[in-house]
Image (spheres, rainbow, N blue to C red):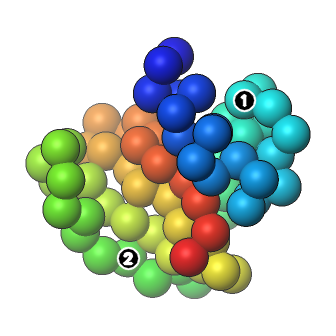
Amino acid sequence: MASLQAHFNKHGAEVGAVNVEQYLRKAEAFKQNLRGATKSPVAGQTNGAVRYKKNGKYIDIAPDGSIISFGKQ
């Protein structure tokens, strides 16, 4: 949960989320609608992570399907 809180603190306002729960809901909704998104590998702590960009936002997804980060480009 600490990581989720840290990502909300960093990106919450830029994606219009007023709390951690809303940030997570917005990230989950974005993840469900990736048609037309551009896809690229992400360098970082999670090997094999992929970044999807669409409509000025991005989401980083781990190989196991978990959300790593969500924010504005």
Q: Look at the numbered disc 1 and give the secondary structure of its residue.
A: helix
What residue is drawn where x is 41% and y is 36%?
A: 66
Residue that mark 2 sits on: 39
Q: Does residue 2 lie above or below 62 as drawn?
A: above
Q: Percent x, y for residue 58?
A: 54, 67
Quarter of the image that includes the C terminus: bottom right
Q: Is residue 56 left or right of residue 18?
A: left
Which amino acid type corresponds to the residue marked 2 in the rendered image? Lys
Q: Amino acid at mark 1?
A: Val
Left or right position of 27 against 60:
right
Q: Nearer the viewer, mark 2 or mark 1?
A: 1
Point out residue 3 in the picture as x, y percentages from the top left corner.
Answer: 45, 27
45 sits left or right of 72 in the view: left
Residue 33 x, y percent position in the rendering: 66, 62
Task: Please tell me which residue lies in front, 30 or 24.
Answer: 24
The dot on residue 40 is none
Is residue 2 positioned above or below 68 on the image? above
Q: Is residue 33 above or below residue 25?
A: below
For the image, the number of numbered tags is 2
Out of 2 and 24, give the one closest to the viewer: 2
Q: What residue is shown at x 65% (from left), y 80% (from top)?
A: 56
- Residue wearing tag 1: 20
Label 2 residue SS: strand
Q: Is residue 39 visible?
A: yes
Residue at horizontal 31 percent and vertical 44 percent from the top: 62
Marks 2/1: CA distance? 26 Å
In the picture, measured across the screen, residue 5 lies left or right of residue 15, that is left
